[in-house]
Image (tube, rainbow, N blue to C red):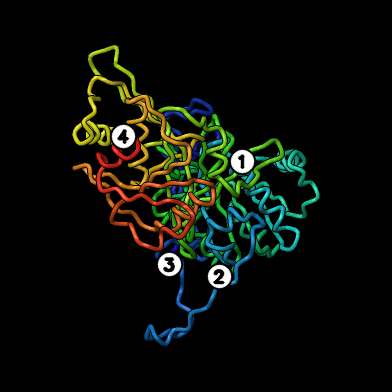
């Protein structure tokens, strides 16, 4: 069925408008707009989410035990941190969405990755925000001038489809999806309908032509990818590129991955020559720690499958006002407030007249409940003005009654602490097993925060 396009034309000057206007903004004439309709016979060139994937032949239901599982042939991005997040490498024919704040380094990362891929594969870089000369200047600064990738500054999806058919690349980068325009739609570029339709078309290109498509997306002020939520449902992988503007470290995290584990993270450091991989983030976060400082505790957090040792600092000081102030950075505010209440009730510390400040060092954002015990011990250390030994780490979730609850993958956490050089680690009692004593580090089980405070501070 042909789609009807409606527009209004000023009979005095020929000005075109998508809606009826009483006065022409171009020539100033009144009541000159007349309605015009035309048919759009481009249904085959578009793909909506409902008809994106078409049936291949006479398919029939097949029993699950008769289905042959095929292992995906992955392509290395030449960045081990990115390969980890993607589940072991890039899967051909996948659609990967990368979101992040403006200036965080999304385009820089993709330019570095595609420059490496272009040495062995045909790569098409479609830019809707920068000209070819601007991309060339960045490539020269990053030392990537010899890359053989193809640059294509364009926003019209019809021209992009035609170019992809002519060039037949193996990898395509869309920078960014909010600048792409489907001309068969009347809506404004960047609107929800445009983003949804462009994503649908890119999905068809990826699956039918077996082309890997990287899509860069803008984020809203709340930190989520701009556009309809269906966009994240349609793509195969959703990555968030995050970082603190005051720190050089960048973290890329998968929140959805059809070809690997979600919540994996990779770490990079932003330098003048581009992004550099950080293969040992635990050592980076602990390198500037003072050995006998009060209010400092080490948490062993698990990001995806990777254990990371992060320093948590706390400052507890008497309030100068009637209402105690609580401030956090990198740690959930509501969780910190809850732990302060538990510590006052179950740890017998008078904190209601104390200001409390909590931060995760290095710009890390720690949300795992397993850091609770380290947060509690950092607060206690600052309140008592007693330092925690530099070779001690903590793992455990704290409940409302003060008990230390068990967490998952304890062996991996203990191994990481032992590898960095820690000599003692406090863990939940219910996680204790005999084999955990074989990693060259003393493992101390605790049942409650009161017991942990007594063992550490006496």
Structural distance between the alpha carbons of marks 3 and 4: 67 Å
Going from the N terminus, do you reach mark 3 or mark 1 first?
Answer: 3
Residue at the (29%, 35%) spot, across then down: 334
Q: Nearer the viewer, mark 2 or mark 3?
A: 2
Q: Secondary structure at mark 2?
A: helix
Question: Dot 3 corresponds to which residue?
Answer: 51
Going from the N terminus, do you reach mark 2 or mark 4 first?
Answer: 2
Going from the N terminus, do you reach mark 2 or mark 3 first?
Answer: 3
- Disc ID at residue 410: none
Q: Nearer the viewer, residue 428 or 260?
A: 428
Going from the N terminus, do you reach mark 2 or mark 1 first?
Answer: 2
Question: Dot 1 corresponds to which residue?
Answer: 269
Query: Considering the image in quadrants, where does the N terminus appear?
Result: bottom left
Going from the N terminus, do you reach mark 4 or mark 1 first?
Answer: 1
Question: Dot 4 corresponds to which residue?
Answer: 458
Q: Nearer the viewer, mark 3 or mark 1?
A: 1
Pointer 3: residues within 10 angstroms few (<14), some, or many (20+)?
A: few
Structural distance between the alpha carbons of marks 2 and 4: 66 Å
Q: Secondary structure at mark 4?
A: loop
- Disc ID at residue 208: 2
- In percent of width and height, residue 194 lies at 47, 49
Do tag 2 and tag 3 residues touch (Cβ < 8 Å)?
no
The reply, left or right, for residue 109 in relation to residue 357 is right
Residue at the (71%, 39%) spot, across then down: 273
Going from the N terminus, do you reach mark 3 or mark 4 first?
Answer: 3
């Amino acid at each position: 069925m042909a789609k009807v396009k409606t527009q209004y034309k000023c009979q005095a000057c020929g000005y075109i408008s998508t809606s009826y206007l009483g006065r022409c903004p171009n020539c100033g004439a009144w009541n000159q707009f007349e309605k015009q309709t035309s048919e759009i016979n481009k249904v085959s060139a578009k793909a909506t989410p409902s008809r994106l994937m078409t049936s291949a032949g006479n398919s029939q239901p097949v029993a699950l035990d008769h289905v042959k599982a095929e292992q995906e042939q992955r392509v290395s991005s030449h960045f081990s941190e990115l390969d980890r997040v993607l589940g072991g490498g890039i899967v051909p024919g996948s659609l990967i969405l990368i979101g992040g704040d403006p200036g965080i380094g999304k385009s820089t990362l993709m330019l570095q990755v595609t420059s490496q891929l272009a040495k062995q594969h045909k790569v098409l870089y479609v830019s809707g925000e920068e000209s070819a000369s601007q991309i060339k200047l960045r490539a020269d600064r990053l030392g990537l001038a010899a890359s053989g990738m193809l640059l294509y500054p364009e926003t019209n999806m019809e021209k992009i489809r035609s170019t992809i058919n002519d060039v037949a690349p193996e990898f395509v980068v869309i920078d960014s999806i909010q600048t792409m325009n489907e001309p068969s739609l009347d809506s404004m570029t960047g609107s929800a309908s445009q983003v949804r339709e462009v994503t649908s078309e890119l999905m068809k290109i990826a699956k039918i032509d077996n082309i890997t498509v990287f899509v860069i997306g803008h984020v809203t002020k709340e930190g989520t990818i701009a556009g309809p939520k269906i966009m994240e449902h349609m793509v195969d992988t959703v990555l968030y590129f995050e970082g603190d503007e005051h720190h050089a470290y960048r973290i890329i995290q998968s929140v959805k991955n059809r070809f690997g584990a979600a919540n994996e993270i990779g770490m990079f450091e932003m330098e003048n020559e581009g992004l550099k991989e950080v293969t040992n983030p635990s050592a980076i976060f602990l390198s500037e720690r003072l050995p006998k400082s009060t209010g400092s505790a080490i948490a062993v957090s698990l990001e995806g499958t990777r254990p990371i040792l992060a320093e948590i600092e706390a400052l507890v000081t008497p309030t100068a006002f009637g209402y105690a102030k609580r401030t956090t950075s990198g740690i959930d505010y509501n969780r910190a407030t809850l732990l302060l209440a538990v510590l006052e009730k179950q740890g017998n510390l008078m904190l209601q007249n104390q200001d409390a400040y909590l931060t995760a060092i290095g710009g890390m954002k720690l949300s795992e409940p397993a850091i609770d015990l380290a947060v509690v011990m950092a607060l206690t250390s600052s309140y008592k003005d007693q330092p925690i030994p530099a070779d001690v780490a903590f793992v455990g979730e704290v409940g409302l009654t003060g008990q230390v609850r068990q967490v998952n993958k304890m062996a991996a956490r203990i191994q990481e602490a032992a590898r960095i050089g820690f000599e003692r680690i406090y863990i939940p009692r219910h996680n204790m097993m005999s084999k955990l004593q074989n990693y060259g580090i003393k493992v101390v089980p605790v049942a409650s925060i009161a017991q942990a405070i007594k063992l550490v501070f006496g």
